Image: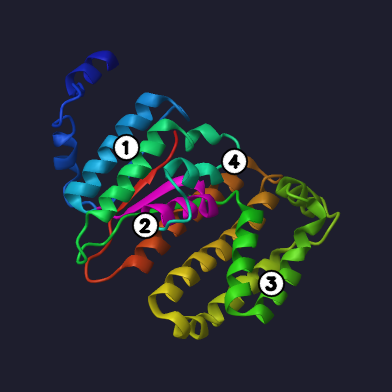
Amino acid sequence: MTDAELVREVAQPLTGGADDYDALLELIGDARIVLLGEASHGTHEFYFERAAITKRLSAEKGFTVLAIEADWPDASRVHRYVRGADEDADANEALSGFRRFPTWMWRNTVVVEFVEWLRQHNNALDSKQAPAGFYGMDLYSLHGSINAVLNYLEKVDPAAAARARRRYSCFDHFAREPQEYGYAATVGEIESCEDEVVDQLVELRQKAGEFLRRDGDVAAEELFFAEQNARLVKNAEQYYRSMFRGRASSWNLRDRHMVETIEALVAHLNGSRQPKAIVWAHN
């Protein structure tokens, strides 16, 4: 049997009907994590069908975690919007934080429509149902995540914010270009910032109990987001140094960070019912 014949035998054509993905949902069954890739970095058809599958998984199987191959701070703004925050007027505005190339992967019409759907889906849930969230799992947002950690600490502990600012000032000589930092640290032009970013993550985790006692569930959510940003900074620092040592090592670091992010999300959201996650990635 040729490859074409094999594909023809197992392929299930899409008709645009409501039952297009019945067989897929049956195959997914009780799986807790579903990976929905795409091979185009921006083709409308891939995005449209992936959004259609995600809607059904959310509405029919109770999936509440959507982790996308994008930066944590940018996705956090969308997360707040789909959870009902009023800081943005609509989904298009909520997605405006995605400015890093290539913006079209997330700031496109399909994702705008899907984000609006997700907000409406959450609004329609009763109080006993967990709302869905929108999260980034990539590690390119070194400076954006630094700013997020500092903003959080300024609110809860200004003295801790001052210490974090001193540690993160290690990157100040490289403007907004972390690749320049990675090269300089790799060739020995500067000392790496590894100790500083590790120390910052350790301190944030050590002070978690103190921060959590302040505002209950709200504090837990804000602390979790701050910790993920601090962890991202630590992993991004290592990633940008590894770029100049070998392509495979840097990709492995990035993939490990994404897996750790999904694991952290599931652990954070784990309650009486274990959360189920959908992953949107490329290639």
Residue nearest the viewer, comparing 275 with 211: 211
Q: Position of residue 57 (x, y in %)?
A: 23, 45
Q: CA distance from mark 1 to mark 4?
A: 21 Å
Task: Name the residue that disc number 2 marks.
Answer: 84
Task: Name the residue that disc number 1 marks.
Answer: 51
Q: Which comes before the other along the chain, label 3 or label 4?
A: 4
- Of circles 1 and 2, which is in front? 2
Vertically, is 165 above or below 253?
Answer: below
Q: CA distance from mark 1 to mark 2?
A: 20 Å
Residue 27: name its quadrant: top left
The span picked out in magenta is 63-83
**Mark 2, secondary structure of its residue:** loop
- Of circles 4 and 2, which is in front? 2
Query: How many numbered discs?
Result: 4
Q: At label 3, which amino acid type do we have?
A: Ala
Return the mark for residue 164: 3
Magenta-colored stretch includes residue 150 = no
Q: CA distance from mark 1 to mark 3?
A: 39 Å
Task: Name the residue that disc number 4 marks.
Answer: 99
87 relative to 117 in the view: left or right? right
Q: Which comes before the other along the chain, label 1 or label 4?
A: 1
Crowd rating for badge 1 (residues with CA inside 10 Å; few <14, some 14–19, many 20+): many
Residue nearest the viewer, comparing 195 with 207: 207
Q: Position of residue 98 (x, y in %)?
A: 55, 43
Q: Which comes before the other along the chain, label 1 or label 3?
A: 1
**Can residue 34 be seen in this snapshot?**
no
Q: At label 4, which amino acid type do we have?
A: Arg
